[in-house]
Image: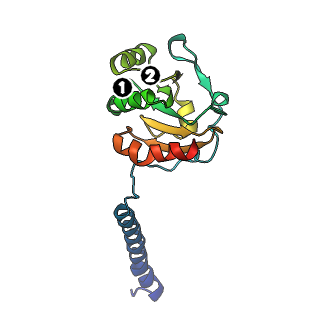
């Protein structure tokens, strides 16, 4: 039985279209890499340009937690950093967060799906750069924020708007190449 001309065109055209789209995507990534504008950790977030979603979380071990209302108008730009005691990249990021805090940046932490005693032990071992720490034991607030995993960091400007999100541990390259520019812009 002979194949119709339309069916032959589809069998040839669909793979060709997929190859063209894939090639265009690959070429776009290469162009961005050449401009030093490609960051695989810079995941899109529906929160960019908006206020954080409504939430209210308790503090760690009886300390003050916080809610979205506490983020409405910070005195200057600040970070909200999601972390967990079981997170190896969080340990790698700890020194950078400590350095940022010592250099005047306010960082509030949200402990993600963790037990209070293990979170306290983590902070005792790795330092506590956080001005306030909330706990998201259920993980529901993380879902509403669009958190992919920990660590994850959000920049909140003076008007309470999310301006940046970074998935992964903050490094000197990320701080010097991106975060510091954003802090100057939104100060």
Q: Position of residue 32 (x, y in %)?
A: 39, 63
Q: Identify the residue at image location x=51%, y=34%.
A: 79
What's the image's color scheme? rainbow
Q: Give the labeled residue for mark 1.
A: 86
Q: Is residue 7 visible?
A: yes
* Left or right of residue 163, residue 42 in this image: left
Q: Residue furthest top?
A: 62
Q: Identify the residue at image location x=34%, y=29%.
A: 95
Q: Identify the residue at image location x=66%, y=33%.
A: 73
Q: Position of residue 151 (x, y in %)?
A: 42, 34
Q: Quadrant of residue 117?
A: top left
- Along the viewing direction, whichever of 175 and 69 lies nearer the viewer: 175
Quarter placement of the N terminus: bottom left
| Pointer 1 or 2: first along the chain | 1
Question: Badge 2, how many Cα within 10 Å: few under 14, some, many 20+?
Answer: some
Could you say which disc has been placed on residue 114 in the image? 2
- Along the viewing direction, whichever of 184 and 148 lies nearer the viewer: 184
Asked if marks 1 and 2 touch (Cβ < 8 Å), the reply is: yes
Q: Position of residue 65 (x, y in %)?
A: 58, 20
Task: Determine the CA span between mark 1 and mark 2.
Answer: 8 Å
Residue 138 vs 15, above or below: the answer is: above
Q: Quadrant of residue 26?
A: bottom left
Q: Position of residue 107 (x, y in %)?
A: 50, 29
Question: Badge 1, how many Cα within 10 Å: few under 14, some, many 20+?
Answer: some
Secondary structure of the residue carrying tag 2 is loop
Residue 162 vs 36, above or below: the answer is: above
* Left or right of residue 51, residue 123 in this image: left
Secondary structure of the residue carrying tag 1 is loop
Q: Identify the residue at image location x=55%, y=47%.
A: 185
Residue 187 vs 4, above or below: the answer is: above
């Amino acid at each position: 039985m002979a194949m119709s001309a339309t069916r032959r065109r589809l069998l040839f055209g669909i793979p060709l279209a997929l190859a063209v789209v894939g090639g265009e995507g690959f070429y776009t990534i290469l162009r961005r890499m050449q401009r030093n504008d490609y960051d695989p950790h810079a995941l899109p977030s529906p929160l960019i340009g908006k206020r954080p979603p409504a939430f209210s979380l308790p503090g760690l071990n009886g300390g003050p937690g916080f809610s979205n209302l506490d983020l409405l108008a910070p005195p200057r730009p600040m970070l909200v950093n999601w972390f967990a005691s079981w997170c190896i990249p969080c340990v790698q990021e700890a020194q950078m967060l400590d350095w940022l805090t010592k250099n005047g940046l306010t960082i509030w932490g949200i402990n993600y799906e963790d037990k209070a005693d293990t979170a306290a032990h983590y902070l005792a071992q790795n330092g506590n750069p956080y001005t306030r720490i909330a706990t998201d034991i259920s993980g529901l607030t993380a879902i509403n924020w669009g958190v992919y995993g920990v660590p994850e960091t959000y920049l909140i400007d003076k008007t309470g708007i999310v301006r940046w999100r970074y998935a992964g541990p903050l490094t000197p390259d990320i701080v010097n190449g991106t975060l510091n520019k954003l802090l100057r812009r939104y100060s």
